[in-house]
Amino acid sequence: MKRVAFQGEMGAYSEVAASEFFNRDVIVIPKPSFSDVFDAVSTGETEYGIIPIENSLTGSIHENYDLLLEHDLVIIGEIKLRIVHNLMVNPGTRLEDIRRVYSHPQALSQCKDFLAQLDGVELISVYDTAGAAIRIRETGSRDEASIASEQAALDYGLEIIKSGIESNHLNFTRFLILSQSLEYEAKNSKTSIVFSAKNIPGALFKSLSVFALRDIDLYKIESRPIHGTPWEYMFYLDFNGDMRQDVIRRAINHLEEIARFIKVLGSYRKGEEVIGRIQERHD
Amino acid sequence: MKRVAFQGEMGAYSEVAASEFFNRDVIVIPKPSFSDVFDAVSTGETEYGIIPIENSLTGSIHENYDLLLEHDLVIIGEIKLRIVHNLMVNPGTRLEDIRRVYSHPQALSQCKDFLAQLDGVELISVYDTAGAAIRIRETGSRDEASIASEQAALDYGLEIIKSGIESNHLNFTRFLILSQSLEYEAKNSKTSIVFSAKNIPGALFKSLSVFALRDIDLYKIESRPIHGTPWEYMFYLDFNGDMRQDVIRRAINHLEEIARFIKVLGSYRKGEEVIGRIQERHD
């Protein structure tokens, strides 16, 4: 079976997204950092990696944009996972017993309306949501809770007191699937590139014109600083179509006249919005 | 004397930037969070606020872009402060005694080449650089150090063991100065706006065309998610010129045909790149 590296512990939202993308037909390998995920794929330790790239409430995960530029990996797919946050405790703990809640700072922030109703509860930021669940399980405490995925509750034997506690339910995280080599899908595809424009007037406008003049829809633009040249930027673009189409190759050729640097990150099928289903583990 | 609110403790880089911008002719008021800085100006507690908006290595401070949209304040100036990181200790502590280094995670990351040379030293992330300096001072410990500004070392009686320990010296943070009302500078100005484009083909390209067709130089584009409509974005633009010029007002009128929403954040004089000078405090 193929292997996919993800950042975090078992039960992390990245793991749920990986299982959904590969229809559970994959071995998930946890890694401590995003950089370790890129390394696992680059060295061939795993065939695939999965990284979060954007949340519909909090925006882009910029570290992963920078890592995409530094590594020679290819994006072969994406999936948009609906993020459902759950308050979970050691069995028997009641809502009114809770004195401390552990989770990733972003999860705590996304549940702040719910958490504001709990009187005198301390919020404690930790590195990842599944790690917070593990901590509750390991201490066995009866006055603490964590916020994590339903999968994490199942994996670590915790009881969900309340589900869907996020303030805004239109909360999706878009994940990218990385590989060493291209895997083209036939249709409904998009392409991701990164480029830096030459230092000429209207450079960004001219860069976007190569797509507009060919009626190629843009989905997203993201800018990141270039180290060593303050106030100049790398631009990351997602647009409709794939590199096997003449019109897309011509647009990229045209962009080469305007850009100082271009890298195609991959063409891949547009991802669906999904709700993660939980799975029983059989060790 | 006018007052300016900043996030952090005395000796924070934001405070150094505020002193430079106002030529020390200002009273600096520390606040715990960026949101508190916006509130201080909105309620009239202070005439001005200063916020970091972008670092030349790590990119934009997205929380502050979101806060600019939420509040009705005006940008009246900017300053680009060269960030010089210093390793500081209680007097008498030697480099080889250091076992733990406290600072903001971004400062630790920007000094990682220097820190990698220190054997067996634990790196501990705290909320801000000046707060790390205060901690060292308060514990009086002889085996700990912090990374902060020269001003923080002076303010808290610490000794700088090594100065300029950042890996990349082209490390600038751009700060914005906020006020309740416009203060126009005569020349060398730029304008910042935020807008969302209508859901039409080539919307971003058409939006940028209103500037390109009038030879108005763009300096920066930043995108942020719109809550409630996943995968649509607010765009923040900085461009040359100010709102008293016909050509700029015409460009904005033209953009209104394409945009769903526009807010002008301010026209202000382009900021200089400066190195912060330290100041003796007289309490």
Image (cartoon, coloured by chain):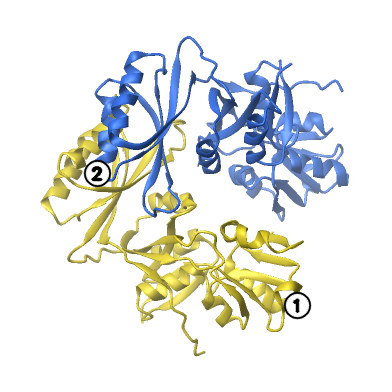
Chain colours: A blue, B yellow
At mark 1, the secondary structure is: loop
Quadrant into which the N terminus of chain A falls:
top right
Q: Position of residue A161 (x, y in %)?
A: 76, 36
Q: Residue furthest left?
A: B246
Compare residues A3 and A217 and report the one nearer the observer. A3
Image mark for residue A200:
2
CA distance separating discs 2 and 1: 54 Å
Return the residue nearer the eye: B227 or A214: A214
Question: Which quarter of the image is occupied by the C terminus of chain A?
Answer: top right
Q: In the rendered structure, which amino acid carries the disc numbered 2?
A: Ile
Q: Left of A243 or right of it: where is A88?
A: right
| Residue B204, picture quadrant | top left
Asked if labels 1 and 2 touch by Cβ distance under 8 angstroms, the answer is: no
Q: Which residue is mark 1?
A: B142
Residues packed near mark 1 inside 10 Å, few (<14), some (14 to 19) or many (20 plus)? some
Q: Nearer the viewer, residue B72 or A230?
A: A230
B60 sits to left or right of A120: left
Would residue A75 be found to the left or right of residue B252 on screen? right
**Residue A153 visible at all:** yes
- Report in which chain the residue with disc 2 lies: A
Q: How many marks?
A: 2
User: Is B2 in front, or is A228?
Assistant: A228
Q: Which mark is residue B84?
A: none
